[in-house]
Amino acid sequence: MPLYAAYGSNMDPQQMAHRAPHSPLWGSGWLPGWRLTFGAEELSWDGARATVVEDPFHQVFVVLYDVPRWDEPMLDRWEGVDLGLRRKHRVRVSTLDGDVLSWLYVLNGYEGGLPSAAYLALVANAAEKAGAPDDYVTDLRGRPCRSLGD
């Protein structure tokens, strides 16, 4: 069974324990050939949402979870799959133990727009809790975002 690769706020193990309580943390790794970006600003009340797009010059830090079939529908609802906000995509994640087959959620929206400052902080904090390298977290915290009132 492929693992779920979280790159946004689901990197936070506490959040995942709430959203998919039977899905243990498996490890972490890198998604080579992909770039973390934000998009679908028009579909969210709180600014653009995290997503990934293919880009041969980048890589994305991910946290891997072993999600059983009975947790998957609940996680799909959290991610808006039933509303058409996101779709699942299979990828290979590089780990210290080799590549693993994984799946992740990708936005069904255009790249672009700014996340809210609160949402960007949530993603950066999740990456930090998950053990992402300091430079990766610093880069996240330094990204442009919408301030209150924008």
Image (cartoon, rainbow, N blue to C red):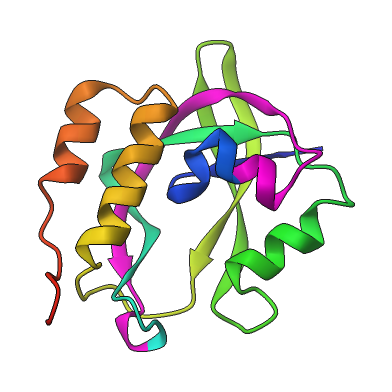
- Residue 60 in view in this figure: no
Choose between 69 and 2: the one closer to the eye. Answer: 69
Judged from this view, the residue extending furthest toward the front is: 148
**Quadrant in the rendering for residue 120:** bottom left
**Residue at 21%, 76% in the rendered image:** 113
The magenta stretch spans residue 37:
yes
63 sits left or right of 17 in the view:
left
| Residue 94 location (% of width, % of height) | 49, 25
**Residue at 74%, 39% in the rendered image:** 2
The relative height of residue 112 versus residue 15 in the rendered view (above or below) is below
**Residue at 26%, 41% in the rendered image:** 58
Choose between 110 and 8: the one closer to the eye. Answer: 8
**Residue at 27%, 59% in the rendered image:** 118
The relative height of residue 72 versus residue 13 in the rendered view (above or below) is below
Judged from this view, the residue extending furthest toward the right is: 70
37 sits left or right of 141 in the view:
right
Range of residues picked out in magenta: 16-42
The magenta stretch spans residue 51:
no
**Quadrant in the rendering for residue 26:** top right
- Residue 72 in view in this figure: yes
| Residue 78 location (% of width, % of height) | 63, 65
| Residue 146 location (% of width, % of height) | 14, 70
